[in-house]
């Protein structure tokens, strides 16, 4: 038995997972249209490389990675690009973003695929590039481009962790993927291990998923000879506790190590990928398929909760229709009930907006007032420290709340605001029903905005100081010229007087440079006027 | 639509306060059993005053009245204060103490969650400083004094200050066991002699030790239902025990045994119900240990060497002052900012 470690806090919300694990993953039918956002990943928006009216094939590149942290976006099926414009996307801000709208032609006609025969023949850099161009991003929710996580500096990776914890209630997409496609996950994991040159691969799966654990173990045994040549793969059942699937907490449970504040897991020799990401890596390299679809759980206030394999860009209302939302539906939540967000344009009166699912969409929870009753009005904090007891980051949430509320952002930072992982455990247990996480999000965004403003101010100050220096220099030059002018005037005065022979001789000398002096004086006057005018 | 998390397992502030009130019931029942129902009158009087003051202050502060009246926090202050003062205290004392606790100690500091001092203990301090004589007239346990008042006579005394013909206050009241001990020690009697007086029971005062058992039972319920953590009550009682034990070992004729300190006065009530007030106590576990140990030390010093009959209230208030400092210096290490990592808390 492997020694497991413990992290502070955590909660046990009702899991509500069995509803969506009764049925196998179903392929979602081709939707009437696909809205593919060009910014579905952390980092820069992909640059569109197709135009409205273009015919595209399934898997064809429509968005080129733009910048270091960016990823490619592809046509999920064959059809015609109807528009490239701003559309409402699944983002908490409710702001629109650049999207390609694709009308499928129904043929689902692929581009010519170029699978990698044996990835071990390729350099890591080549493989990274292939993954980047295949649009592979983390499918656990953050959608961080995977190729960047595989780019190492000098660090030696000891442990590769495959995150199959899936600790959020309702979500079962990873569970079902592990049950049904464990072999491909294991192969993807071995590719990642190869690229990182890691010593061991640990699959962290919460012990409420015995089928998934068994499936992974079987897949590892089945591919035994291939894996034994390389390094050890081990499935580890970890205790079911939220947020056990948060990368830092999972690393702690499996290795006993804490990722130091402000550092990356690679700094302590660990790297972490979601199991679905490993699956996608395998598809991208062994089959040459870019990331076009993913497994998504549809659960909550529906007739039949289920997991679907759906194309990226599928309008969420079409996806939900497959599970039949019940009449008292009042909105959709993307993600889990602890960290997800209410989708814009999906609640309230008026026509529903066709917000599309993206690479990060692991779950759509159909909500109703009965399922998620609005919280009672918040009461003052009574410092009961239930939030402290459950905080997996060992923070003092009640103090951070106080600082955020009174806008003491400096103190909030001193009290490690940025170590908060926004898991929501504190809000979940707060007897005063204070939306604590919302306060932390507010404080963080305010601090980031201020830091941005400060940068701008610093730049402006530098410019100003430079300007001041220039004025100072010009003043000095002006004064020098004025002095010269005065000298010239004195000389003229001398000329007006009856002259001695000596003086005449001196004057003759001076005359030669008079022209020059006049020029100088003239320019000084001009300069003065110019400056006065300017000031 | 609201923000994540969309689910909550919170019972609410009112439910927590209600559980604390319920946890007081065993102690109150035993109080009534041994000392008669007068305490219920004090509790009722304090409750009405607390709710009325709370409503008035909320209105003055332009805050919503209904949600705060329903949070049960004012009731808790009222009950704790009523349990800290003599049951036969005149009605206006209960009213003044409670109104001061709610209006000054709670609302002038910002209301629920913002008071630096435990309001009930502030109310108690005001009363014992302003009306020291009335605060020493405790009802004697039933069967210990010659004359006993009927409930109607008790009511009459509380509201009009009139005793039945021929009775003096001294005939029906007495000093508390702690107070009696202190007075007689000054008269150079030994602890052993003093404890033979009928006012004393098995461990502490006759009757009052049983009430303490009631509060202990309620306190353990609070622990079991995780409304309070062990840090404050265990550290407080443990420290009190150790200090009393050291003195007792050194000189048993002058220093009473540790268990007497536990079961006399407000030690148990303080350990589980007063010092644990979340608002006015530290938020860090290490801070709670320091806070409770400090309170225990002060309790012992005030009881043994001070001028007041009991030390729990002043110990609480003095430690309340230290809370911000204690919290500042006992901040736990944040995840990822610990040294080592692997060494600590392996399950």
Image (cartoon, rainbow, N blue to C red):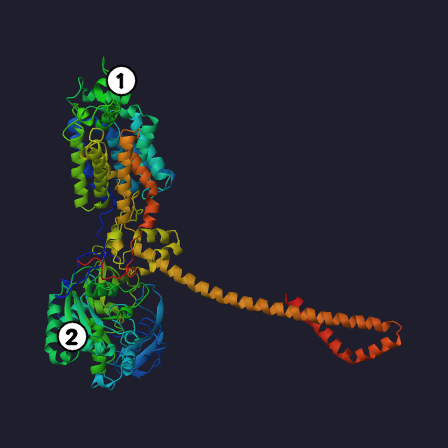
Structural crowding at the residue carrying mark 2, measured as other residues with C-alpha within 10 Å and reported as few (<14), some (14–19) or many (≥20): some
Looking at the rendering, in which quadrant would you find the N terminus of chain A?
bottom left
Provide the chain ID for the residue under circle 1: B
Residue nearest the viewer, comparing B33 with B239: B239
Against B43, is A455 above or below?
A: below
* Residue B52 visible in this rendered orientation of the protein: yes
Quarter of the view holding residue B201? top left
A492 sits left or right of A215 in the view: right
Mark 1 — residue?
B162
Q: Is residue A72 left or right of residue B242?
A: right
The percent position of residue B240, horizontal first and vertical second, equals 23, 38
On screen, B209 above or below A283? above
Q: Which residue is mark 2?
A: A232
Which quarter of the figure has residue B222? top left
Chain letter behind tag 2: A
Residue A304 x/y as whole percent: 15, 65
Query: Which dot, 1 or 2, sits closer to the camera?
Result: 2
């Amino acid at each position: 038995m492997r020694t497991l470690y413990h992290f502070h806090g955590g909660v046990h919300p009702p899991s509500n997972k069995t509803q969506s694990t009764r049925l196998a993953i179903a392929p979602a039918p081709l939707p009437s249209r696909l809205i593919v956002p060009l910014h579905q990943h952390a980092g820069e928006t992909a640059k569109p490389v197709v135009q409205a009216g273009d015919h595209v094939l399934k898997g064809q590149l429509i968005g080129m990675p733009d910048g270091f942290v960016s990823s490619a976006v592809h046509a999920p099926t064959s059809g015609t690009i109807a528009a490239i414009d701003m559309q409402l996307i699944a983002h908490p801000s409710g702001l629109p973003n650049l999207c390609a709208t694709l009308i499928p032609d129904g043929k689902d006609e692929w581009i010519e695929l170029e699978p990698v025969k044996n990835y071990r023949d390729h350099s890591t850099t080549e493989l990274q590039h292939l993954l980047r161009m295949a649009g592979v991003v983390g499918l656990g929710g953050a959608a961080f481009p995977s190729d960047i996580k595989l780019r190492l500096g000098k660090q030696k990776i000891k442990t590769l962790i495959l995150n199959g914890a899936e600790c959020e209630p309702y979500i079962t997409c990873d569970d079902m993927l592990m049950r049904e496609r464990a072999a491909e996950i294991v192969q993807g994991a071995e590719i990642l291990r190869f690229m990182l040159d890691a010593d061991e691969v640990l699959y962290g799966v919460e012990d409420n998923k015995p089928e998934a654990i068994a499936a992974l173990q079987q897949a590892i045994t089945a591919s035994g000879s291939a894996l034994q040549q390389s390094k050890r793969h081990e499935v580890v059942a970890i205790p079911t506790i939220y947020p056990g699937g948060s990368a830092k907490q999972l690393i702690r449970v499996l290795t006993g190590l804490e990722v130091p504040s402000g550092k990356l897991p690679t700094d302590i020799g660990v790297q972490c990928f979601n199991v679905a990401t490993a699956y996608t890596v395998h598809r991208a390299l062994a089959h040459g398929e870019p990331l076009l679809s993913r497994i998504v759980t549809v659960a909550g206030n529906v007739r039949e909760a289920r997991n679907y394999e759906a194309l990226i860009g599928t309008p969420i209302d079409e996806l939900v229709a497959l599970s039949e939302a019940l009449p008292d539906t009042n909105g959709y939540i993307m993600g889990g009930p602890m960290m997800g967000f209410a989708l814009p344009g999906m609640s309230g009166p008026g026509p529903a907006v066709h917000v599309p699912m993206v690479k990060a969409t692991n779950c759509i929870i159909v909500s109703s007032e009965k399922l998620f009753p609005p919280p009672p009005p918040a009461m003052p904090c009574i410092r009961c420290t239930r939030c402290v007891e459950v905080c997996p980051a060992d923070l003092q949430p009640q103090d951070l709340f106080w600082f955020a509320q009174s806008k003491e952002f400096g103190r909030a930072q001193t009290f490690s605001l940025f170590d908060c992982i926004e898991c929501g455990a504190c809000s979940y247990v707060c007897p005063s029903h204070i939306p604590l996480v919302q306060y932390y999000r507010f404080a963080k965004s305010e601090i980031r905005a201020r830091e941005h403003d400060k940068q701008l101010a610093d730049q402006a100050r530098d410019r100003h100081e430079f300007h001041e220096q220039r004025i100072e220099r010009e003043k000095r030059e002006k004064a020098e010229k004025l002095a010269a002018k005065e000298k010239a005037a004195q000389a003229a005065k001398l000329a007006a007087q009856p002259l001695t022979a000596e003086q005449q001789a001196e004057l003759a000398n001076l005359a030669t440079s008079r022209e020059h002096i006049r020029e100088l004086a003239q320019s000084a006057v001009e300069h003065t006027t110019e400056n006065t005018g300017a000031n | 639509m609201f923000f994540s998390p969309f689910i909550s397992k919170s019972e609410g502030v009112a439910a927590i306060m209600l559980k604390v009130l319920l946890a007081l019931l065993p102690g109150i029942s035993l109080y009534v059993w041994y000392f008669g129902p007068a305490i219920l009158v004090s509790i009722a009087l304090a409750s009405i005053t607390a709710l009325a003051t709370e409503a008035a202050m909320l209105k003055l502060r332009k805050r919503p009245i209904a949600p705060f009246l329903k949070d049960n926090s004012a009731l808790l202050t009222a009950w704790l204060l009523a349990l800290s003062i003599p049951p036969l205290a005149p009605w206006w004392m209960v009213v003044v103490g409670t109104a001061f606790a709610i209006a000054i100690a709670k609302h002038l500091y910002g209301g629920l969650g913002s008071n630096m001092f435990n309001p009930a203990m502030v109310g108690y301090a005001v009363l014992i400083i302003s009306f020291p004589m009335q605060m020493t007239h405790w009802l004697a346990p039933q069967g210990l004094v010659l004359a006993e008042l009927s409930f109607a006579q008790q009511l009459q005394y509380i509201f009009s200050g009139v005793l039945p013909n021929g009775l003096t206050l001294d005939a029906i009241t007495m000093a508390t066991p702690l107070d009696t001990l202190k007075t007689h020690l000054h008269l150079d009697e030994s602890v052993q002699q003093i404890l033979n007086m009928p006012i004393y029971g098995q461990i502490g005062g006759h009757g009052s030790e049983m009430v303490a058992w009631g509060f202990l039972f309620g306190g353990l319920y609070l622990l079991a239902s995780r409304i309070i953590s062990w840090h404050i009550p265990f550290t407080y009682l443990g420290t009190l025990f150790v200090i009393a034990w050291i003195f007792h070992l050194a000189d048993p004729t002058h220093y009473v045994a540790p268990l007497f300190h536990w079961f006399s006065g407000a030690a148990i009530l303080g350990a589980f119900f007063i010092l644990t007030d979340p608002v006015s106590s530290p938020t860090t576990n290490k801070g709670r240990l320091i806070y409770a140990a400090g309170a225990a030390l002060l309790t012992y010093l005030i009881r043994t060497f001070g001028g007041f009959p009991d030390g729990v209230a002043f110990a609480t208030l003095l430690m309340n002052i230290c809370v911000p400092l204690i919290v500042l210096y006992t901040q736990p290490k944040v995840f990822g900012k610990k040294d080592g990592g692997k060494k600590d808390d392996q399950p």
